[in-house]
Image: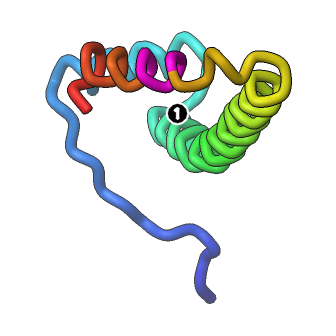
Amino acid sequence: MTTPNKHCTVRLDRSKYDHLVALAAERGCTPSDLIRAAVDSFLSAGQLFTSSQRRLARISEFQQLALDIIIREQFPEYRDRLIAETDKRLEQYHGA
C-alpha cells in the first residue's frame, strides 16, 4: 500500500533549523508541518501573483486607453508633447 505523500529531504543551516524547531514547539506542531505549510503557501501565492499581475495589467491598459481617448478628443494639441515627455522620463528613470 502506498501513501499519498512523498518523502523529500531538505537541508537547512543550523540557525534556520534551530529557529524552525523553536517555532514548531511554540505552535505545538512538528517542523515538517511548518515546512508543508510554507510550501503550500508558496505554491498558492504563485497563482495569486499571476492573478494580481493580470489585474494590474488590465487596470494599466484601461487607464492608458482612457487617457489616450481623452487627450485625442479634448486636448489634441498636447498629445505630441506628452509623448515626448514620456519618452524622456522613460530614458531618464528606466534607461530605456
Range covered by the magenta-colored residues: 81-86
Our reading of the magenta stretch's main secondary structure is: helix
Residue visible at 41% across and 14% down? Answer: 22
**Is 49 covered by the magenta stretch?**
no
Seen from the viewer's position, the closer of residues 71 and 35 is 71
Is 57 displayed left or right of 30 in the figure?
right
Residue 36, percent from left and from top? 54, 45
Residue 79, percent from left and from top? 61, 23
Residue visible at 50% across and 17% down? Answer: 81
Seen from the viewer's position, the closer of residues 84 and 8 is 84
Seen from the viewer's position, the closer of residues 30 and 71 is 71
State the residue position of label 1.
34
Residue visible at 80% across and 32% down? Answer: 69
Residue 35, percent from left and from top? 47, 39
**Is 82 covered by the magenta stretch?**
yes
Q: Amino acid at mark 1?
A: Leu
In the image, residue 28 above or below residue 52 = above
In the image, residue 7 above or below residue 39 = below
Residue 92, percent from left and from top? 25, 15
* Displayed quadrant of residue 68: top right
| Picture quarter with the N terminus | bottom right
Q: Residue furthest bottom?
A: 1
* Displayed quadrant of residue 72: top right
